[in-house]
Image (spheres, rainbow, N blue to C red):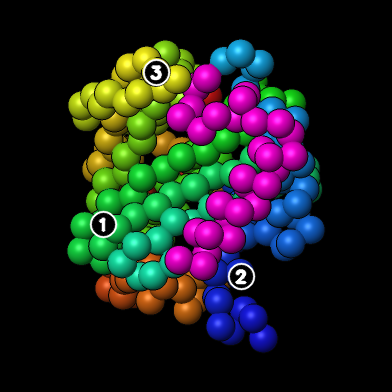
Amino acid sequence: MLIDIWPLKALRVRSPRLELRLPSEEELAAVAEVASRGVHAPGARPFLTPWTDRPPVERARHVVQQHWSRLGSWSPDDWALELVVFFEGHPVGIQEMRAENFGIRREIVSGSWLGVDHQGQGLGTEMRIALLHLAFVELGAVFARSVSFTDNHASLSISRKLGYEPDGLSRDVLDGNVVESQYLRLSQQGWNSQKHLSVTVSGLAGCAALFGIDHHATALGSRQGVVITSEAR
């Protein structure tokens, strides 16, 4: 069976309202359709990816191609996990984490998007918490990083709410103009010092080697002192 060859297909991350997991081909098409309807207001540009500039079919195709590319190029030393976010049984966006040499560095970088029809309901915060639980509690990450344009207030607000601290700036070129991005970093200690909504993870058996770790030697030890009880606000 495919799940024996690719055990990540069994991975499930669940929070009170959401489920994060790899999609079927039909579900991948459905989340691509969500992207085709927009991930931010027309005329805005909160990401380097030119969502607004692409016609709907190209937005959808980008989601599908990137998903296939990330899985196809996966290695224990360089991976990117794109989990589709399901709300009330329907895909609403993608929450990603990626890492290089995770088995040594224990550091992940996260990224995400939500369809415009599902924004403003606290789902962005909840899906980030679900991913951070997977990273810190289950996989034994030491640091989690995020990066956002300095005027992407929604993303920055989530990071600050969850305890991320400033970690420098970068300058990129977007449409011929310089744009600044804020790097942020959250430590495992910072994560453990907070209370978070309840998150459960299943289906990690057999996945440790794909992440480049010894699951029993790292993840189980990272659970000590973690308090996960109350809902995020």
Q: Are marks 1 and 3 in contact (CB under 8 Å)?
A: no
| 146 relative to 93 in the view: left or right | left
The answer for how far apart the CA atoms under marks 2 and 1 are is 23 Å
Does 76 appear in magenta?
Answer: no
Residue range corresponding to the magenta coloring = 45-73
Task: Indicate the position of residue 134 as horizontal and vertical percent values.
Answer: 45, 54
Nearest the eye: 83 or 79: 79
Q: In this view, does 67 lie above or below 168?
A: below
Q: Is residue 84 above or below residue 138?
A: above
Nearest the eye: 79 or 175: 175
Q: Is mark 1 on a helix, strand or loop?
A: loop
The answer for how far apart the CA atoms under marks 2 and 3 are is 43 Å
Q: Are marks 2 and 1 in contact (CB under 8 Å)?
A: no
Nearest the eye: 215 or 231: 215
Task: Indicate the position of residue 125 as horizontal and vertical percent values.
Answer: 52, 31
User: As shown in the figure, which amino acid type bears the numbered disc 2?
Assistant: Ala
Residue lying furthest front: 176
Q: Which mark is residue 10?
A: 2
Query: Mark 2 or mark 3: which comes first in sequence?
Result: 2
> Which corner quadrant of the image does residue 62 belong to?
top right
Q: Which residue corresponds to mark 3?
A: 176
Q: Which residue corresponds to mark 1?
A: 106
Q: In this view, does 144 lie above or below 166?
A: below
User: As shown in the figure, which amino acid type bears the numbered disc 1?
Assistant: Arg
Residue at the spot 27% in from the left edge and 46% down from the top edge: 143
> Visible in this render: residue 90?
yes
> Which corner quadrant of the image does residue 147 belong to?
top left
Q: Is mark 3 on a helix, strand or loop?
A: loop
Residue at the spot 57% in from the left edge and 15% down from the top edge: 44
Residue at the spot 35% in from the left edge and 23% down from the top edge: 173
Q: In this view, does 41 lie above or below 22?
A: above
> Visible in this render: residue 16?
no
